[in-house]
Structures are given as structure tokens and as C-alpha cells.
């Protein structure tokens, strides 16, 4: 009887702790804007998702660093801006906000400028990286032009608003 | 036996003169010792060919300029005056040639399609049938994603990933490595030309010629601890790789100094160069120095300071492996 009571108390504590954990919610696919939901941007391929065990198939040796920081999966989609600029958007689902911050801070700020997006963000001529909660987002454009930076920012905002909705 | 052609006669005379000089200098030394002393003087050549106008005024590599760049690099490496002579030194009609490209970095940081086309053109001029050339990497989708046109069968250059044919069932083993090899390597080619990319790597420090062989095996994810050391060196000791490897043509047109192996534009630069060598260790060592110079220019610590100096290079050169040299005194870097 006493053992049963102890077990029940432990279960209750576990449930309380679980409720307090910050877990990422939402489906990796729903975070990507569909074609033209962000002006000028069209999705050009299927969304792919790599779970933790298969992360190395997408980012090879970099996977170790992400897994140590608690990466659970990455979702990736290809886009094209105004039929001119190809880009890839990667959304890493980390275990918590600290994990996203660990990766964000580990990347040196070379030729980038901080901007207001999510919890922290950096923009360069061909890439945008930001973190929001337990998500780390990287958008890379494959061509550089006068429009690229602003276009990346627009797509980034589109993704950020979907992450906020969860 | 064929009579010596002009180039071969030149080669023969050069060797005779070198041998005579060594023998003369060696005094009372025996022939074997003299040969060893001659070998000790020999340097591994790494040719770096540049073309500042490789992309013209745009961002796309110009095919014609790429072919010229390749020719310049190869002629300098083999000390020949024209391209067809260089490739005939490398391959013979009837051989099947595999070009192991690197497409893991995705668009922006993969083996250039124009470079591969240029290599295929010169191979065919050297007498290799188109259908006896296979351009390959681990995954067909990744290859297609970066612009390669997949082809299997027919009389054209073959182009597909190991996912189409699978890996051998048996493990190939050396030292710390036990892996199943791509059937493209084991069954589809008897000559291997390595076409890696010049990249920083988060684990190994750099990923260039030697680590490109991770794309040949079924379990590269197992070999990333400890800076990929001694796994990279051990992998390249596998007979199927070592016996077939003839040349490395490193795509250094777009290179990466941080954040590799994936493409991060803020850490990449348009280097507009090719690096060629028959010594993969010397090439990796030289590529490492190029990356370090770029890092210093950008205000980043040396890889040692980041706790990821590429230790695998010294391992590949050590007495157990002897895959090449990492001694700068024994590397001749030729810039053209």
C-alpha cells in the first residue's frame, strides 16, 4: 500500500515536470509558406524531413554538433524568388531554446549584420539565420543580387510567423 | 614494342640524366641506395590553376574557360605541352573510369558540373568510351539537386549514385574501418579520379581529397569521432580505393573556410581555381593552408585554435599509411 502511494506520488511529479517542459510543437511541414504566401516566393520541391538519427545524411559531419545541442530533426524546402533566385530554407527543431541558441552563437559573425527577427537573427548578402524558441532557421540563397537580402528577410518573416503560431 | 614518341623520349632522357646525376653524386653507394636517395629528392607536385575571369562578369562558371583551366592544370602537373598528351599518360582505352564527385554540400558547394564535363571530354579524347565513364556519388537525388543529369545505360557518360546499385555485401576492412563499398567502385570502374571540393569541415578540420572517400562507403556516420582520425587515413588504405586512385582534381572554384561541409555563403568565397595532384595527402595539406590563410584574412582563429586542426593529414602520411606527404619541404606547389 505504501509502495503504491509512493508510486502514485512519483507519477504525479513526473506529469507535473512533463507539463513544464518546453517541447516544440507543430508539424515541420506547416512552418513553410506555400507558394506565393510570401510575395514573390514559390516552393520548388517537396519538403524533406530528416530525424535525428538520419541528420548526417543531410549535413554530414556537422550533425555531431547539432545533435550535441539537442537537435531532433531538420525540415528543408527549396524556393525560388520571382523565378530568378533559388534558395533553400532549413528549419532545425531543437530540444529547447538553449539548443537553438548554442548553434546560433557557435557560428562566427563574419560579414553579417544583426537584425530584428525571432529571438536573434543575422543577415548577410545571401543568407539569413535566426532562432525562435527551440527552432533554428537558416535560409540560403544561391545567387547574390540587390534584391536578395530583402527577399530573404520576407521569407524569413513568413516562416517566423508560422513558428510563432506553432 | 613501340619506338619512343617525342614526349616519351624526353621522359626517358630526363630519367637517365637524373639517375646519372644521383649515381654520380652517390659516389660509392650501391644502386638501390642511390635510387632511394633519388626518391628522397622527389617532391609531390600540387598544381593550383587560377582564372580570375572563370565566371566572366556573372556568377556562373564558363564552360570554355573551365576546360582551359583544366588543361592548364593538367599540362603543368604532367609537364606536357598539350592536353591530349596529359590524359593519355593517365588512362588507356578499354579502362573504365569513375569520377567520384562531391555533392553533399548541395548547391553552391559541390563539384562543378562544368568541371566534370570538361574531364569527360578530355577522357573521351584520350580514347575512353563515354559509356565507360561513370560520374558518381553516394546519392542520385543529391547529384540531381546540384545539376547533374542522371544517366544509366546507353552510350553516354553514366551518371548516378550508389543508391541505384547498392553497396557490396562484404565488409572491406583496414585498421579502424570496416565498411561496405559502393558497387560503382568495386564493379563499375578500374580507374578512380577524385573530384572533391575545397572545404572546411566541422569535425575533421578540412574535407578535401581523402575525406571525399567517405562517399564510397555505407557507414560514414560511424567515422566522425576524434576529428575523423584515423578513419580517413585507414579508409584510403583499402585496396579497392588505393589501387584504383590515379588523380585528384579538386574543385576550388567556390571554397569554404568555416561552417563546412554544407554551404554557408557568408563563409565561402569565389576562389576560381582548380588543384590537381597525384598525391592526395600533399593536396589536402596544401588545401588546408589555403583555408587557413582565408580564415586569417577574415579574422578567424586557425583551426588549431578551434580545436579541429586536421590531424588526419599527418596520419595519412605516417609510416603505417604512406598515402603521400604532408612535409612542405617535399611538396612542390606550382601556381599557373
Image: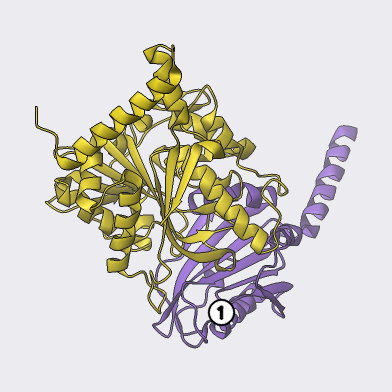
Q: Residue A114 versus residue B207: which sits nearer the camera?
A: B207
In the rendered structure, the colour chosen for chain B is yellow
Q: Residue at x 38, y 27 (%)?
A: B21
Q: Residue at x 59, y 77 (%)?
A: A156
Q: Does B251 sit above or below residue B268?
A: above
In the rendered structure, the colour chosen for chain A is purple
Q: Residue B222 versus residue B191: which sits nearer the camera?
A: B191
Q: Does B252 sit above or below residue A133?
A: above
Q: Quadrant of residue B19?
A: top left
B173 relative to B260 in the view: left or right: left
The picture places residue B12, in percent across and down from the top left corner, at: 24, 32
**Residue that mark 1 sits on:** A152
Q: Residue B100 versus residue B41: which sits nearer the camera?
A: B41
Does any portion of residue B321 appear in the rendered image?
yes
B9 relative to A78 in the view: left or right: left
The picture places residue A84, in percent across and down from the top left corner, at: 40, 82
Does any portion of residue B96 appear in the rendered image?
no
Quadrant showing the N terminus of chain B: top left
B274 relative to A116 in the view: left or right: left
Quadrant showing the C terminus of chain B: bottom left
Crowd class of label 1 (few under 14; some 14 to 19; many from 20; radius 10 Å):
many
Q: Quadrant of residue B34?
A: top left
Q: Residue at x 65, y 76 (%)?
A: A165
Q: Residue at x 55, y 27 (%)?
A: B318
What chain does badge 1 belong to? A
Amino acid at each position: 500500500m505504501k509502495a503504491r502511494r509512493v508510486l502514485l506520488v512519483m507519477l504525479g511529479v513526473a506529469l507535473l515536470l512533463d507539463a513544464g517542459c518546453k517541447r516544440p510543437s507543430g508539424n515541420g511541414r506547416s512552418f513553410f509558406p506555400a507558394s506565393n504566401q510570401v510575395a514573390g516566393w514559390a516552393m520548388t520541391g517537396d519538403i524533406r524531413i530528416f530525424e535525428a538519427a538520419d541528420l548526417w545524411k543531410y549535413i554530414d559531419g556537422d550533425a555531431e554538433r547539432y545533435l550535441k545541442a539537442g537537435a531532433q530533426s531538420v525540415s528543408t524546402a527549396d524556393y525560388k524568388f520571382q523565378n530568378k533566385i533559388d534558395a533553400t530554407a532549413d528549419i532545425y527543431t531543437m530540444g529547447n531554446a538553449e539548443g537553438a541558441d548554442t548553434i546560433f552563437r557557435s557560428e562566427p559573425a563574419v560579414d553579417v549584420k544583426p537584425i530584428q527577427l525571432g529571438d536573434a537573427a543575422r543577415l548577410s548578402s545571401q543568407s539569413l539565420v535566426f532562432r525562435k524558441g527551440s527552432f533554428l532557421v537558416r535560409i540560403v540563397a544561391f545567387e547574390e543580387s540587390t534584391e536578395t537580402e530583402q527577399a530573404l528577410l520576407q521569407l524569413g518573416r513568413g516562416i517566423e510567423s508560422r513558428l510563432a503560431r506553432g | 614494342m613501340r619506338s619512343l614518341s617525342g614526349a616519351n623520349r624526353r621522359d626517358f632522357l630526363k630519367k637517365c640524366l637524373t639517375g646519372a646525376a644521383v649515381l654520380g653524386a652517390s659516389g660509392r653507394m650501391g644502386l638501390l641506395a642511390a635510387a632511394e636517395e633519388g626518391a628522397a629528392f622527389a617532391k609531390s607536385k600540387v598544381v593550383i590553376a587560377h582564372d580570375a575571369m572563370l565566371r566572366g562578369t556573372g556568377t556562373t562558371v564558363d564552360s570554355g574557360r573551365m576546360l582551359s583551366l583544366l588543361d592548364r592544370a593538367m599540362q603543368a602537373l604532367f609537364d606536357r605541352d598539350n592536353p591530349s598528351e596529359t590524359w593519355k599518360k593517365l588512362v588507356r582505352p578499354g579502362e573504365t573510369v569513375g569520377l567520384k564527385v562531391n555533392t553533399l554540400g548541395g548547391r553552391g558547394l559541390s563539384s562543378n558540373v562544368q568541371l566534370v564535363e570538361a574531364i569527360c571530354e578530355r577522357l573521351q579524347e584520350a580514347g575512353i568510351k563515354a559509356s565507360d565513364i561513370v560520374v558518381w556519388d553516394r546519392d542520385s537525388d543529391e547529384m540531381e539537386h546540384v545539376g547533374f543529369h542522371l544517366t544509366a545505360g546507353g552510350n553516354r557518360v553514366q551518371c548516378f549514385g550508389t543508391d541505384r546499385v547498392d553497396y557490396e555485401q562484404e565488409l572491406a576492412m583496414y585498421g579502424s574501418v570496416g565498411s561496405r563499398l559502393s558497387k560503382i567502385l568495386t564493379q563499375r570502374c578500374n580507374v578512380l579520379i577524385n573530384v572533391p571540393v575545397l572545404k572546411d569541415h566541422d569535425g575533421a578540420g578540412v574535407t578535401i581529397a581523402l575525406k571525399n572517400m567517405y562517399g564510397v562507403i555505407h557507414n560514414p556516420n560511424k567515422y566522425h569521432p576524434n576529428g575523423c582520425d584515423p578513419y580517413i587515413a585507414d579508409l584510403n588504405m583499402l585496396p579497392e580505393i588505393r589501387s584504383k586512385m590515379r588523380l585528384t582534381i579538386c574543385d576550388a572554384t567556390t571554397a569554404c573556410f568555416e561552417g563546412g561541409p554544407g554551404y554557408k555563403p557568408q563563409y565561402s568565397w569565389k576562389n576560381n581555381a582548380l588543384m590537381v595532384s597525384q598525391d592526395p595527402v600533399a593536396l589536402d595539406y596544401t588545401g588546408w593552408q589555403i583555408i587557413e590563410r582565408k580564415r586569417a584574412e577574415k579574422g578567424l582563429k586557425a583551426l588549431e585554435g578551434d580545436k579541429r586542426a586536421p590531424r588526419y593529414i599527418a596520419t595519412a602520411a605516417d609510416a603505417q599509411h604512406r598515402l603521400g606527404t604532408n612535409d612542405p619541404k617535399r611538396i612542390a606547389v606550382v601556381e599557373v
